[in-house]
Amino acid sequence: MTGAAVQAARGGPLPLASARLGWATAADRRPPRTSRPRARRRPQTVATKKCRRSRTLFTEEQLKILVQAFSQNPYPGYTAKQRLAVEINTEESRIQIWFQNRRARHGFLERPKKNLGSSKDHASPKEKMQGKQDRRCRTSYSSSQLQTLKNAFTENPYPGIDSREQLAEEIGVPESRVQIWFQNRRSRLRIQRKRGLEEASDQRQNQGQDL
């Protein structure tokens, strides 16, 4: 008996002998290990890009005016935003979004709360009227308009710019109002779901204590 036959009888590995003699061992039949390729990020399709609003590009002069206004007041009112929009020749909704992005970039988490107890009571009628005028007029929707918006929200809670413009034309309001309505609707649903989860958790805890 040869040395190779003795090793085969003992069960030792014979990678070289098996390759030469044509024998197939379990190790030979095992597929070679290959490094798993990384999952690549899926490229955006043309349809996805079309659904987005084209990014507003401001000139250096426009940015200088916006930055100066932001340094004076990071939370401008509706009148101030309208005045800025006329000054730099753009839409008021673009001004609003620019300030929102600027505040998020600089860590403004929420609007500072005013002392409602004293300042509101001692405010003059002129200051109260000015505060009301500084706010944007709330958009009132009819029942048919609301039904159209709710149906669209059920189909897609995140509509693109084309869908929002089509909805705006259908119900006769600016596209920026449709965008804000969808934002408020999504926020309201998130709050309702959070409350529902908290109530369900409290109920389970109460049931556990009763047992």
Image (cartoon, rainbow, N blue to C red):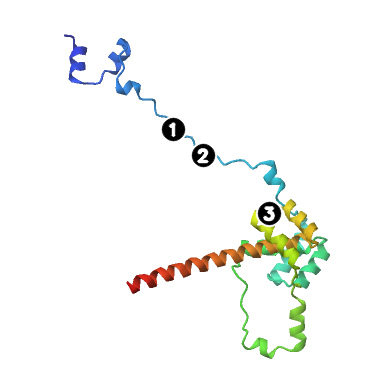
Q: Is residue 26 left or right of residue 106?
A: left
Q: Where does the N terminus fall, quadrant-wise?
A: top left
Viewer-side residue, 205 vs 158: 205
How far apart, in angstroms, are the residues tagged by discs 2 and 1? 12 Å
Q: Is residue 131 left or right of residue 109?
A: right
The three-letter code of the residue at mark 2 reads Ala
Whole-percent x and y of residue 21? 30, 10
* SS category of the residue bearing label 2: loop
Whole-percent x and y of residue 204? 40, 68
Q: Can residue 97 be seen here?
A: no
How far apart, in angstroms, are the residues tagged by discs 3 and 1? 40 Å
151 versus 72 height, above or below: above
Residue on which the image places disc 2: 39
User: Which residue is rendered at x = 63% and y = 84% of the image?
Assistant: 116
* The furthest residue to the bottom: 122
Disc assigned to residue 23: none
The three-letter code of the residue at mark 3 reads Pro
